[in-house]
Image (spheres, coloured by chain):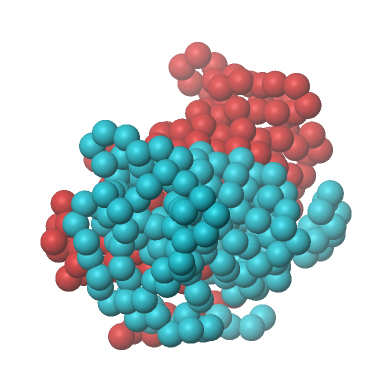
Chain colours: A red, B cyan
Amino acid sequence: MVLKVSAQGRQNRQYQFVRKEEKPMHALENITYDELHEGDYATFTRSLTEEELVLFAAASGDVNPASLDAEYASHTTYKERIGHGMWTGSLISAALSTVMPGPGTIHLEQQLKFDLPVKVGDTLTVKLTVKEKGERNRVTFQCEVINHNNELVVEGESVVVAPTEKVTLERPTLPRIHIDNQ
Amino acid sequence: MVLKVSAQGRQNRQYQFVRKEEKPMHALENITYDELHEGDYATFTRSLTEEELVLFAAASGDVNPASLDAEYASHTTYKERIGHGMWTGSLISAALSTVMPGPGTIHLEQQLKFDLPVKVGDTLTVKLTVKEKGERNRVTFQCEVINHNNELVVEGESVVVAPTEKVTLERPTLPRIHIDNQ
């Protein structure tokens, strides 16, 4: 269930995603175009684990040595392996698909500016804020991703077609995935 | 080894990535800022399999029902499950990290426009073209992703810091990943 936290600040609504591990959530409920208001925002929090880094590389074919080769990475500016920038981008997609607006959203455009590296163990929070509602159910969201030190790591903008039909459905579950230790 | 195909057309160089399954490639070699010229392009081809779709969802937490819930998807405009738009975005990242410019590239900005859905089984080719070389080793690439029917599915632009030091290194290998059948 998407938690709806009471209004704060200038009466905009806040939606918060709580990770499955922290609180069972078996349903996805969307927020329709009509229910969205400029200034409304939602957050989605996720940590970069070793597993997620490897799965992202396997899904995309992005075997960037800066992300996967510890020896190579030790000689870079960052001194250690960093997550793929587009992994952080994928969290924005997750926030759009599962939190706000949620099921039925069609992703049309995405802008991303990568400001700071993300390291294994970092916890990121995506904040999506309704910037503008347009014609034909278009909604533009401002996207900010901050790390656990409250530093802005990625900023950008999403344009979507928001759903018009209210939907509540079971959260899809993924098959078990095993990663062999090397 | 990154294949360097002979010049064609207006003398711009073409770099082509061949999937590991098709031809063993154990090294990644970058293309430095000085070696890049406006109009040079590179391609990176990858198919959306069931496995990649599931791994992307697991890596990002993006359990979009349009991608994962066949019953739900059958009632959408697309009639069947579609890949995450950001999965296609991640292929652009893979092309930047592993083909052109390759190791040492720092991804600064990414713009994406999602034009057409991608379905399981579709084969996508990312084409990166050097659009502009700027100061401080900045390079802007035009990005086009076409499917096996030669339809444009994603277009956009990447801004990176290109590497200045020539690097050839072993292609990182991933651990074995098993996905349980459900």
Q: Quadrant of residue A159?
A: top right
Residue A73 picture location, percent across and down? 20, 63
Image-based side of A83 in relation to B179, left or right: left
In this view, A34 is above or below B54: above
Question: Which quadrant of the structure image shows residue A49?
Answer: bottom left
Please indicate, yes or no, whether residue B56 appears anywhere in the rendered image: yes
Relative to B140, is A142 on the left or the right? right
In the rendered image of this protein, does residue B163 appear above or below residue A7? below
Q: Residue at x 36, y 76 (%)?
A: B1
| Residue at 55% from the left image edge and 42% from the top image edge | B156
Across and down, in percent, residue B19 comes to 51, 76
Locate the C terminus of chain A and report the quarter of the image it occupies. Answer: bottom left
Q: What residue is rendered at 53% in x and 47% in y? A: B143
Identify the residue shown where x is 53% and y is 83%.
B22
Of residues B128 and A174, the one drawn nearer to the viewer in this rendering: B128
Depth order, front residue of A27/A94: A94
Residue A26 in view here: no
Rendered location of residue A65, percent (x, y): 29, 66
Q: In the rendered image of this protein, does residue B62 appear above or below residue B19?
A: above
In front here: B116 or B127? Answer: B127
Relative placement, left or right, of A67 versus B52 is left
